[in-house]
Image (cartoon, rainbow, N blue to C red):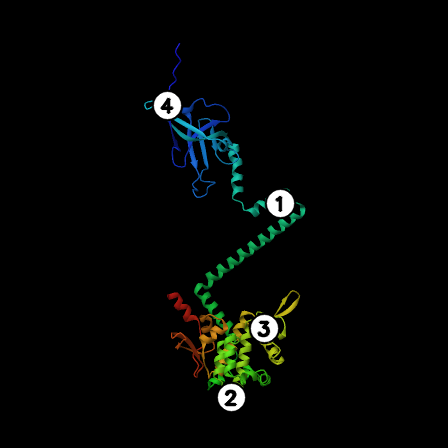
Amino acid sequence: MTAEVLPTARWQYCGEPDERRKAVLVQFSNGKLQNPGNMRFTLYHNNDSENPRKKNQRILAAETDRLSYTGNNFGTGALKCNTLCRHFVGILNKTSGQMEVYDAELFNMQPLFEDELVESIPSLESQTKSFREKIDSCIEAFGTTKQKRSLNSRRMNQVGSESLNLAVAKAAENIIDTKGVDALVSDAIQDDLQDISLYLPPCHEDATKPEDVYKFEDILTPAEYEALKIPSEAFRKVTSEEILKMIEDNSHCTFVIEALKALPLNEERRDHQARCIWFLDILLKFRTHKVIKRKSVLGPEVPHIITSKLLKQFTCLSYNNGSLQNLISNSMKVKITAYVIILALHISNFQIDLTVLQGDLKLNKKRMIEIAKAMRLRISKSTLPRADSMEEEHRLGTLSIPLPAAYSLEHQSKRRKVI
């Protein structure tokens, strides 16, 4: 009796039949397939190829005349065997006797009913909810009475703020429709100009001399000027060595250093210049603060009458943590800048280097020019040499008679529109 010889075949592993796609094996959870030719299959895959967790996600849909089926390889409905073992599909070529083996994946097909389709809609909506909304849903279902009360209060506040925002937006639209965008821009520009002018010292437009446009008495009263004699004594007697030490220690700003270098030899004029420079230096240091917590913040050498002047003229009272404090707001910094410019004009014979003062005041060029023009200064350019043998362009501000026309920003806004 001869043994039966079984047919043999050579197999060849081919991996995946298509890029990112394994062969599909299906099993039906509700029975065996009776008529395979009546099935219509559709395979969907995730388009996110960058995410390693999503790029292999697939959904298989099948339709018959009676039922629809669906299966996937991710989520709660996925078969665990796909991760625990590997499946293969072999295709035998009878002519060559070679078996081509491909990677495969098993899908468990479950019937899909209309009720399940309707129930799946809320789950899709829940996926789009934020973390905050999901927490609120949990509080609604399982939260304590206190948590639910807090949730209702927060939602009421949110509705109130949304209503307010809608009302403000509608009012803004009505104003824009009534006045037009150009008129609103012009009003805003004029308001900005008026904000600057509110904090400028009195300007005497009918003056016949530059020193009478911004009178020195409007900056310092006789009593305040007299109080500067003792603290400014060090500036009046300053030596070249002390000025070099100031530069090395970076204890004073550039304008003060240059003004001290140019002190006149005449005793009376030197004393006057020293007092002005000292007060300008105090203003610059005072401007660097945001909140004045104590009156001695500038040092014990500042006379009481000067400290009171600074607090009264250049700060505004604010209430914080149950106490009043002196705040140097942005508008007050504009006011200090204007007074610094006027003092600098009186010190430098009514022509100042705005670029130097801009650096000392830590302002941008545009803001510095705006304030200078609002103070009726004529702006010019000058090229000055630097220490590295290069040249640098500076802006000079000059107070001269007759005064230029009052500065308006309208022409500047029109030029911007053209550009």
Which residue type carries mark 1? Ile
Q: Which of marks 2 and 3 is in front?
A: 2
Marks 1 and 4 close (CB-CB < 8 Å): no
Pick whichever of labels 2 and 3 is earlier in the sequence: 2
- Badge 4 element: loop
Which residue type carries mark 2? Arg
- Whole-Å distance between the Cαs marked 2 and 3? 31 Å
Task: Identify the mark at residue 269; answer none if there is no mark.
Answer: 2
**Residue 82 in view (yes/no):** yes
Pick whichever of labels 1 and 4 is earlier in the sequence: 4
Residue at which label 1 appears: 139
Residue at which label 4 appears: 9
Is residue 274 shown left or right of residue 378?
Answer: right
Pick whichever of labels 4 and 2 is earlier in the sequence: 4
Residue 160 horizontal/vertical position (percent): 58, 54
- Badge 1 element: helix
